[in-house]
Image (tube, rainbow, N blue to C red):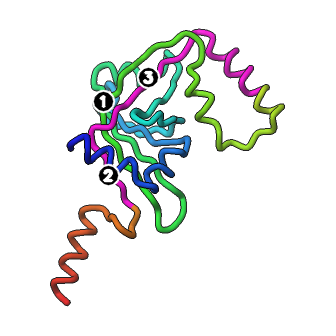
Amino acid sequence: MRQTEITEILNRPISQELLARDVTRLAYVAEDGTPRNVPIGFTWNGSTIVMSTPPNAQKLAALRVNPAVALTIDTEVHPPKILLIRGQAELDPVDGIPDEYFKTATSYRMTPEQRVEWEAAVRDLYVDGMVRVVVTPTWVKLIDFETTLPKAVEELVERQQARA
């Protein structure tokens, strides 16, 4: 997929709405060769998806062997809006807590006092730092079920229209 196509899709209003959410599903291949799909907080910085994880997370060993990933960001309403992203994970160990990690919890309802307590607990827990998992999109698809559909559904609609 060309970068201009990726940029055009990611700049659409629905894509921007989805990229402003704070949870994605990260799919990757585990070290034993089986698929994994885990929810994980993320931020979009305009060019990459950034996720943070503990340095002892099992997914890191798998991503070092096979960095190919797929991400799904979607809504819980009908019709769903779905942004599918593929790319390669780059691992960036950091001392302390990445700024992006604190941005991922923006949709959680917390009082200012709870937020302060939560941030202190996070800083205390991750004393060994974290690893930023950075994905630059190499393929994207937006499905909104109004202007875009999954490929298989598009084909069925075309067949249905041909029969009419």
Circle on res. 35: none
Instruction: Tell me whether the residue at label 3 lies in contact with that at label 1, contact meaning CB atoms closer than 8 angstroms.
Output: no
Q: Nearer the viewer, residue 128 or 104?
A: 104
> What residue is disc 1 on?
88
**Depicted 45 relative to depicted 97: above or below:** below
> What residue is disc 2 on?
141
Q: Residue furthest right?
A: 113
Dot 3 surroundings within 10 Å: few (below 14), some, or many (20 or more)? few
Dot 1 falls on a residue whose secondary structure is strand
- Give residue 30's quadrant in the image: top left
Q: Residue furthest left?
A: 162
Q: CA distance from mark 3 to mark 1?
A: 17 Å
Mark 3 and mark 1 lie on one chain; the one further toward the N terminus is 3
Residue at image location 68% in from the left, 17% down from the top: 123
Q: CA distance from mark 1 to mark 2?
A: 16 Å
Residue 101 percent location from the top left of the image: 58, 27
Q: Quadrant of the C terminus?
A: bottom left
Q: Which residues are magenta?
A: 117-143
Q: Quadrant of the N terminus?
A: top left
Q: Indicate the amino acid at tag 3.
A: Gln
**Depicted 15 relative to depicted 22: above or below:** below
Dot 3 falls on a residue whose secondary structure is helix
Q: Indicate the amino acid at tag 2.
A: Lys
Q: CA distance from mark 3 to mark 2?
A: 28 Å
- Give residue 129's quadrant in the image: top right
Q: Indicate the amino acid at tag 1.
A: Gln
Mark 3 and mark 2 lie on one chain; the one further toward the N terminus is 3
Q: Nearer the viewer, mark 3 or mark 1?
A: 1
> What residue is disc 3 on?
58
